[in-house]
Every structure is written in C-alpha cells, then in structure tokens.
Amino acid sequence: MKLARLAEDYFRRASVRVKSAELAYSEKSYPDVVRYSQECVELSLKAALRAVGVEYPKEHDVGRILKAVKERFPEWFRKEIEKVSEISRDLVDKRSPSLYGIETLGKTAEDIFDKEDAEKALSDAKYVLSLVNRLLIELKIL
C-alpha cells in the first residue's frame, strides 16, 4: 500500500510539472519548460517503478533501472522502455544547463534552450506521463 501511495503522489506531482511547463512555455521561458519537463519524466518513471515495487537509487535518470526490471511491467510498457529511457537520459543531460546555463562558457540557460527545445521536451514529458497514467490505471493505483 505504501508504494502505491508513493506512486500516486509522484504521478500527481509529475502532472503538476507538465502544467508548470505549459505555463513557462506561454511565458516564453523555454529553459524552464525543459527543466519542468525533466522533472515530470523523472517523477513519472519513479512512479512506474514504485508501482511495481522497485526501490531505486536516488538519481535523476532511472532508465537503466527500468531496463533491469522490465519483466515486472506489462508487455506494452516493456516495448516503451527503450524510448522512455532515451527521453529520460536526454532530459537529465539538460537538467543542470536548463537551470544554470553553462557558466564556464558564459552561456545563460536562455542562450542554450529555444522554442524548439522546449516543444520537444514538453512533448516528450507528455508522452511519458501518458504511458505512466495508463500503467497506473491498469495496476489500479489511479
């Protein structure tokens, strides 16, 4: 029961991150869209892991964990693990620059991320969120 409650909480907060990303997009704050999208993907995938009873290390990218325990997921979700792992890895790589820029190069986050980056990040976040929503409904957590 505890893991199901955690999964539900993570998913709810992931949903809020998408709304935050959409607001940031409307304000043309593209680095924030990337950041909130990364947080959405992270929370969504951690919700999926909690839903199937998996403890994971405290790291941002859990793609390798998903791959290691893929047999715990329904077949349709297993087919998506490679793609969601790539999305997670890509957004985790952008996590710090989306907040701080690249200080050593004197580049702000606004210098690095544009509208196209934001649109892809938000689209990816919504994709992962929808998969995890389906999973949690199927597992009777939502």
Image: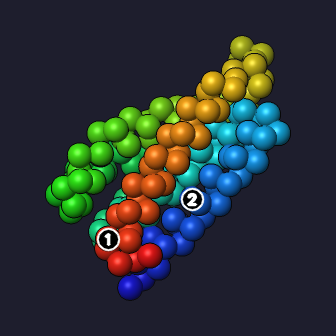
Q: Quadrant of residue 12 in the image?
A: bottom right
Give, as a three-letter code, the residue at label 2.
Answer: Ala
Give the x, y percent position of residue 93: 52, 32
Give the x, y percent position of residue 100: 73, 32
Q: Nearer the viewer, residue 110 or 79?
A: 79
| Quadrant that contains the C terminus | bottom left
Q: Residue at x 38, y 69 (%)?
A: 136
Q: Nearer the viewer, residue 59 or 34?
A: 34
Q: Nearer the viewer, residue 107 or 118?
A: 118
Dot 2: within a 10 Å radius of its alpha carbon, few (fewer than 14), some, or many (20 or more) residues?
A: many
Give, as a three-letter code, the residue at label 1.
Answer: Glu
Q: Is residue 50 among the parts visible in the rendering?
A: no
Say which residue label 2 marks: 14
Give the x, y percent position of residue 87: 44, 37
| Quadrant that contains the N terminus | bottom left
Q: Is residue 142 above or below residue 11?
A: below
Secondary element under disc 1, as helix, strand or loop, is helix
Q: Residue at x 64, y 55 (%)?
A: 17
Q: Quadrant of residue 7 in the image?
A: bottom left
Q: Residue at x 54, y 39 (%)?
A: 123
The label number, if any, that marks residue 138 in the structure image: 1
- Please, which colouring scheme is shown? rainbow
Check the image and name the residue furthest to the bottom.
1
Give the x, y percent position of residue 141: 40, 77
Check the image and name the residue furthest to the right.
27
Q: Quadrant of residue 26 in the image?
A: top right
| Pointer 2 or 1: first along the chain | 2
In this rendering, the label closer to the viewer, 2 or 1:
1
Q: Residue at x 31, y 73 (%)?
A: 139
Q: Nearer the viewer, residue 97 or 140?
A: 140
Whole-angstrom CA distance, mark 2 to mark 1, is 18 Å
Q: Is residue 93 above or below residue 32?
A: above
